Amino acid sequence: MARQLDEQIAGRFPVGQRLRVLDVGMGQGTQALRLARAGHKVTGVEQDPAMIAAARAALADEPEGIQGRVRIVEGDGHQTGVHFLPGSFDVVLCHGVLMYVDEPEALLAGLARMLAPGGLLSLLVRNAEALAMRPGLAGDWAGALASFDSVTYRNRLGIDARADRLDRLTSALAGIAAPLQVWYGVRVFTDTVADGSALPPEWEFEALLAAEERAGRTDPYRRVAALLHLCGVRD
């Protein structure tokens, strides 16, 4: 997914431009730090104290110049209008957040207002059209059958969450003046790999990444990906 995001940034902004990035639901700060190392100014919003502590610890290990490019705000993604003025950011990330929001349209509208004209909105969501894949590949036939007509699931943390359909999000993005420009599949072949599994040898890992990258851009494979990465642009 990082490659896809970098591709969209490179294709939409002048080379060398220092972007203003808002990372909503920044977690432990992986994306925020990566973008700060690339020279961008990143504001991360997070409400989980444990994640904030982890992000601050990771930031403390970075050089002073990178630390100065990252700001962490404790809060909820629905509160962006409280903390920031409309049009304050060139890029807004909302990765792994919508699955915990019952009605995503209001959150998305608030995020779109944060974007400057031409700004990029990057979403990472659970793919509702592929919820039967994980239980089916694991041989859980009852679970697979129950997933076909559902938009809810229990994630690997044991938390009940919600998935999104591509057509609904396409309509939602059009309605908030940030129409969908491109979308990718994420975790097409690797969704069933157990958390914490050892990485394969380097040559095999590179081949795995190349296969995932190709599948994530190619129909019909991307349509059965566990996650969808959608990019909208503020018009």
Image (tube, grey):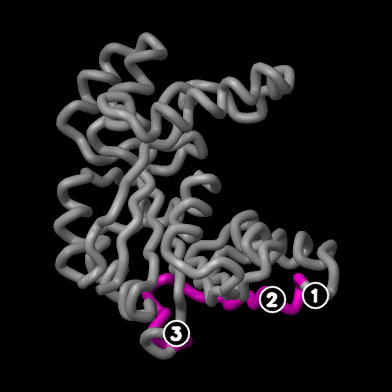
> Residue under circle 1?
65
Disc 3 residue type? Ser
**Residue extent of the magenta highlight:** 66-84
Q: Is residue 72 magenta?
A: yes
Q: Earlier in the sequence, mark 3 or mark 1?
A: 1
Q: Position of residue 90 (x, y in %)?
A: 45, 75
The numbered dot on residue 88 is 3
Q: Is residue 85 magenta?
A: no
Q: Position of residue 160 (x, y in %)?
A: 37, 43
Q: Position of residue 24 (x, y in %)?
A: 48, 66
Residue 71 placement: quadrant: bottom right
Q: Earlier in the sequence, mark 3 or mark 2?
A: 2
Q: Secondary structure at mark 3?
A: loop
Image point 33% across, 36% down: which residue? 153
Q: Secondary structure at mark 1?
A: helix
* Classed neighbour count for the residue bearing mark 1: other residues with Cα under 10 Å, few (<14), some (14–19), many (≥20): few
